[in-house]
Image (cartoon, grey):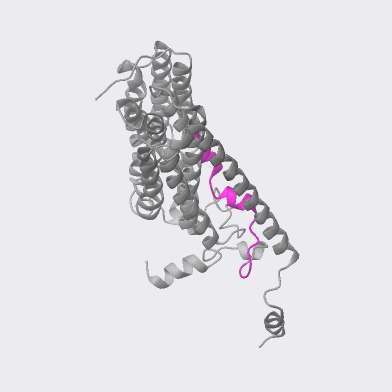
Amino acid sequence: MSMQSETARLTSPLPAGNDGARLGANPVGPSLATPRDYFETLKPRVMSLVVFTALVGMVVAPGHINPVIGAVALLFIAIGAGAAGALNMWYEADLDALMSRTMKRPIPDGRILPGEVLGFALFLAVFSVVAMGLFVNLLSAALLAFTIFFYAVIYSMWLKRWTPQNIVIGGSAGALPPVIGWAAATGSVSLEPVVMFLIIFIWTPPHFWALAMLRSEEYARAGVPMLPVVAGERETRRQIALYSILMAPVGALPFLLGYTSALYGAVSIITGLLFVMASLRLRNAAEGKATERAAKKMFGFSILYLGLLFAVLLVDQGFGLSFGQLSW
Amino acid sequence: MSPVNDQQEDNGIVLTEAQKKARRMRSIAIAVCLGLLVVLFYIITLVKGPGVLNRPI
């Protein structure tokens, strides 16, 4: 990117071609942004998922973490995740303005200036990592810093507009929170958090590709090389099925490796099979409305599946059903 | 120079009511966050004791 266009990105209140200014935005002069607009840039829904998976990583970790320090660690993880989301929102404002799902976000809607979001996000990123390092431990701080960097720079600035494997590799950022939670509790990383990482990592492609199939025209218009845009619907459905077949055993790994109860085993195996079936139904659906319905079901079930696995992991530990820690 | 710019040169940047309201809300939010941080750091210090900055890797 040239220096000139980079300067324009930092100073221009709105992405080129956006109508926010005509809809009551403030193209020049002092900001009209409210605290609510700032809060929206943190992607609160994504933040809540991050906090949930980090909590699971923290709770299933062996040993004892002071509840106050645990809560503080979750707060800093939430702030770090919010910072990553805001950096993503700052960088992708031009794409967001082109897609119906995202065009009402604060920057493309003209409610907040890109420079304000950038400053806010950088401050929160530095604050969350430094505070995590000072009050929790250095390993969790380093992992949090890496997660923010990976999501904002590797995924948002590089992979997203470059390769259809964007969400496969970029999924690492979303998969790290349980590892951070574990590291906050123990000061180390062992096999269990890596397995939790793998569950989210393998889950990400079928989840996002199902969504991308429903939005492929918008992605194409925005020039984002999502798999359905680049490789077509047929290949996307095949890839979703392949990842789903891999997902079922990976989802059951905590049980297969012997550190969760039969409850987790039963839930993960049954829902894993349902996950595969949903993907095969999508794979075999007729073109048109049937595919759209199957993709919607696949997307919806994938959210339920991941939420259920992590909820059962939490219950498993909460009721003392699970076994001890595995080591490398 | 336009009359609007002349006026701005005389009075500096004049905020509209909407801009003043937004600024007031941001100021309150910053004050609340700073207050909460003070309380948070105080609680952390109580919990961790004198070794608040001793952090195992």
Is there any visible trace of residue A61 in the rendered image?
Answer: yes
Image quadrant holding the C terminus of chain B, namely top left
Residue furthest to the bottom in view is: B1
- The residue sitting at 30% across, 18% down in the picture is A257
- The residue sitting at 75% across, 64% down in the picture is B17
Question: Foreground: A208 or B27?
Answer: B27
Residue furthest to the left in view is: A328
Vertical side of A242 occupied by A263: above or below: above
Residue A121 left/right relative to A247 = right
Vertical side of A278 occupied by A214: above or below: below
The percent position of residue A203, horizontal first and vertical second, equals 39, 32
Looking at the rendering, the stretch of residues picked out in magenta corresponds to A27-51
Count of numbered tags: 0
Residue furthest to the right in view is: B17
Image quadrant holding the N terminus of chain B, namely bottom right
Q: Is residue A35 magenta?
A: yes
The percent position of residue A286, horizontal first and vertical second, equals 43, 33
Residue B39 left/right relative to A304 = right
The percent position of residue A56, horizontal first and vertical second, equals 45, 27
Q: Is residue A240 magenta?
A: no
Is there any visible trace of residue A287 in the rendered image?
Answer: no
Residue A259 left/right relative to A308 = left
Question: Foreground: A169 or B8?
Answer: B8
- The residue sitting at 47% across, 27% down in the picture is A66
The percent position of residue A78, horizontal first and vertical second, equals 50, 40
Vertical side of A101 occupied by A67: above or below: above
Rendering quarter of residue A106: bottom right
Question: Foreground: A38 or B45?
Answer: B45
